[in-house]
Amino acid sequence: MTSPLTSRFPYPAGSDGSRRLGYGADYNPEQWPREVWEEDVLLMREAGVNTVSLAIFSWARLQPDADSWDFGWLDEIMDLLHAGGIGVDLATATASPPPWLTAAHPEILPVTASGETLSPGARQHWRPTSPVFRTHALRLVRELATRYGNHPALVAWHVNNELGCHNVYDFSDDAARAFRGWLRTRYTTLDALNHAWGTAFWSQRYSDWEQILPPRLAASHPNPTQQLDFKRFSSDALKDHLRAERELLRELTPQTPVTTNFMVMPGTKGMDYADWADSGLVDFVANDHYVVPGPQDRDELSFSANLTSGIAGHRPWFLMEHSTSAVNWQPVNTPKRAGELAGDSLTHVAHGADAVCFFQWRQSAAGAEKYHSAMVPHAGRDSDLFRAVVELGATLDALAPIAGSVREQARVAILFDWDSRWASEQDSHPTSLLDYHQEALDWYSALLALGIRCDVVTRHAGDLSAYDVVIAPVLHVVPAALAKDLTRYAEGGGHLVTTYFSGVVDENDHIWLGGYPGAVRDLLGIRIEEFGPLPDGESVALDDGTSGTLWSDRITRTGPDVEVLARYSTGLYADLPAVTRRTTGSGSASYVSTRLGAEGLTALLPKLLAPAEVVSELPASARGLVETVVRRDDTHRYLFLINRSEAPVGLPELSGDVLTGSAPTVAPGSVTVLRQPLH
Ligand code: GAL
């Protein structure tokens, strides 16, 4: 299936009318007195800012009470920005309901699994399924669209903000009602639901739809399929809100593209963005990303940007938020090091971001985010941070030629799947330590260490056969149709690699019987009777020198066409296979039964990639030190060289015009972009 995204990307125009990359921030002028606004526009021009997101948290200012509106200030700021040549991604302002609304209608407040109603006083305190909230939100959207639909500063609509950031799981009565409706559509009959949920277990059989509830706090583990369906439903409920705002905007201002900012990053699990994008609800994908410092933080940024590109169908996407320096919401909020602001930004650009924006323009003087960095810090214009912001503006200007180019497809893909992510991490499993995202990231880190480009794709991405190698870590949920697709892929010459706890259940979270991994047992040519999860801190050695944690399997080979690539040398399954490969015609299907971590996978991967003859395109001296990403248009390839190391890396072999950075030596932590003609 190909994504129906139309990619009506709001490119700013240069003075000669050519496309530029977007650059800017969330802009919250309502936090500042009028006299600051003009200085803001002057500083934005100095920094090269051409796009801002406006009015995201302005509901209380725009609608001071149920029956009055105050648009004067927004009229003025829209005009000021337009006069300054700055386009506006105008928010629908529905993210944070004002106190008058929650006081009059406390029934819009979300309820936790244990029945506590969340109070107003922060933000996003609304139930995705509340009809009362929906009515008030759409009324605001209508007012804004009618008033600003033809304003010359308007370049895009920004629906709500980070839908689901704080309110994805709501267990209220509204949610219960909507969940029942969603289940009726999915299952049609109660019999089908009872079967799917396996309600013969623990006397859970439903005899009336009204008996069904969200998985609220219960005496023991709630029904797993109920939990999985509630996750699917909760993602859909927010998608439904997005659809409602979008449809109204589309009706009133059909000429203006609509987006909403996704949060493709490790901690955000609740929203299936691949599905949202595939539903055609955004005209271009926008993403927010924040780095959480840690040993794999550079790799994680690249992984998230790469996955965002996958979600966007490899079309250009919009980096709506990241930080210039420290955030305010970690236990310790360290500043970015010199060069990181640019390095982070350009890594997103490498992976397809055609706009780079920050949270936020001017650092707040009050409120919960006053210690969160911004483009204009508390110290003001005379600061290293603002100088770095101005410098990045100039760099993005120099990169204008890449606007509209798309990522060149890699030969290797990592498949990322929300259903498997949700289902594999549920309770009552062989282990509670499994981390779906971490496993996927480890494979990505290993590919980076080997200098091999890869695409992170989702099941909505279209035909897997475009890739020579598909790595599907912890592909836990495998419906029959997917099992067929994977088999066809491998039999058609593709090389599939999968891991522990893959192919175990169907879409209802029912075990594929007859020995694990039932859905792909024949394809892999193995059979597992029992899992051997490893306690925290325990590991098993493999005879190739690597070691595994988290998981092990007692594998029996079921055919002569299955070779053993590595065996356990210690633990319960010593001498038995740990990594296998079955040859299927011109393709193959490999299985890795333990968690090897990034280092172990780096050692193993060359063996797994060998049948596809995938090797690094980089000279040996640069592998692991430089990440390469390629974008291209009809006339050129744009080679991004991201130096991930602490030392300069020389790449004299590579040719091309230098659009930014330094060549042939790429400075530590920096990014060089070379333009190479295609013909
Ligand atoms: C995002 C949000 C912004 C701001 C930012 C701080 O989640 O959209 O409004 O709160 O985080 O990092």
Image (spheres, rainbow, N blue to C red):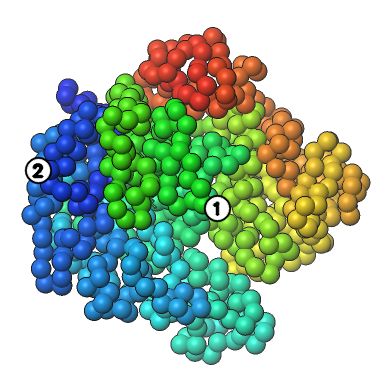
Mark 2 CB in 8 Å range of ligand 1? no
* Residue drawn at x 74%, y 53% as measured from the top left: 550
* Residue drawn at x 59%, y 86% as measured from the top left: 205
* Residue drawn at x 15%, y 72% as measured from the top left: 66
* Residue drawn at x 27%, y 35% as measured from the top left: 380
The answer to whether 70 appears left or right of 484 in the picture is left
Residue 219, position in %: x, y? 62, 83
- The residue wearing badge 2 is 79
Above or below residue 6? Residue 446 is above
Secondary structure at numbered mark 2: helix
Residue 392, position in %: x, y? 34, 27
Q: Quadrant of residue 352?
A: top left
Q: Is residue 546 visible?
A: yes
Q: Quadrant of residue 295?
A: top right
Mark 1 CB in 8 Å range of ligand 1? no
Q: Amino acid at mark 2?
A: Asp
Which mark is nearer the camera, 1 or 2? 2
Q: Amino acid at mark 1?
A: Asp
Q: Which mark is residue 223?
A: none
- The residue wearing badge 1 is 417
The answer to whether 301 appears left or right of 13 in the picture is right
